[in-house]
Amino acid sequence: MLCDICHKEEATVFYSIIINNQKTELHLCEECAAKKGLIKPPLPSMFKEFLPLMPHEPEFEKLKCLKCGLTYKEFRRLGKFGCPECYKAFEKKILPLLRKIHGNTQHIGKTTLIQAKKYEKESKLFELKQKLKKAVEDESYEEAAHIRDEIKKLNKHGGTLI
């Protein structure tokens, strides 16, 4: 259903008012509803800003989310996903875009510097322990000893490798 005001965008806000037992309904897009003061103005979509930078590739126009049915073409037009599964459906196209926008493709959340350093240390320790286990299984004892020493240094120096 299209917006009753602009007749261009999909109506996502449904406004009903009853006066003297007479019901009036408005079907509005987010932008028109915000202009009327019915909702807060929508935040600009980060994707919408960067989507024009992506080259148009017809083979990706056929992509479709199996859960919500959103097509890649609709995603490019709207700049929004229809559901969490869209990330998987359009993964090959959006990972470069996410990297361009955020500098990374994995969100680790907001943290303080202290928490980030602790996470980094724990992550490095886990990685080293996995490598150590693999080296022992492969009977690469010299490599295992080197990894063991790195683990000791990491623990001794509060998380910074020297």
Image (spheres, helix red, strand yellow):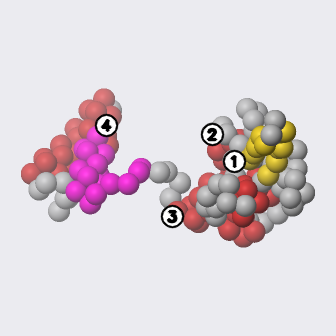
- Image quarter where the N terminus lies is top right
Q: Is 108 situated left or right of 4 in this image?
A: left
| Residue that mark 3 sits on | 103
Q: Position of residue 54 (x, y in %)?
A: 73, 65
The reply to whether the C-beta atoms of the residues labelled 2 and 3 are less than 8 Å apart is no
> Please, what is the three-letter code of the amino acid marked with disc 3?
Gly
Residue found at the very far right of the displayed protein: 7
Please, is residue 52 above or below residue 122 in the view? below
The amino acid beneath tag 1 is Phe
Label 3, residues with CA under 10 Å away: few <14, some 14-19, many ≥20 = few
Q: Are marks 1 and 2 in contact (CB under 8 Å)?
A: yes
| Residue at the disc numbered 2 | 84
Camera-nearest label, 3 or 1: 1
Mark 1 vs mark 2, CA separation in Å: 7 Å
Which region is colored magenta? 108-126
Q: Secondary structure at mark 4?
A: helix
The kind of secondary structure the magenta stretch mainly shows is: helix
Percent x, y of residue 73: 83, 53
Provide residue 151's location: percent of width, then percent of height.
Answer: 18, 46
Read off the residue under disc 4: 130
Please say if the residues under marks 2 and 4 sit with CB atoms less than 8 Å apart: no
Give the residue furthest to the left.
156
Residue bearing mark 1: 81
Which residue lies at the image location 78% right of the left edge and 54% below the top edge?
29
Q: Earlier in the sequence, mark 4 or mark 1?
A: 1
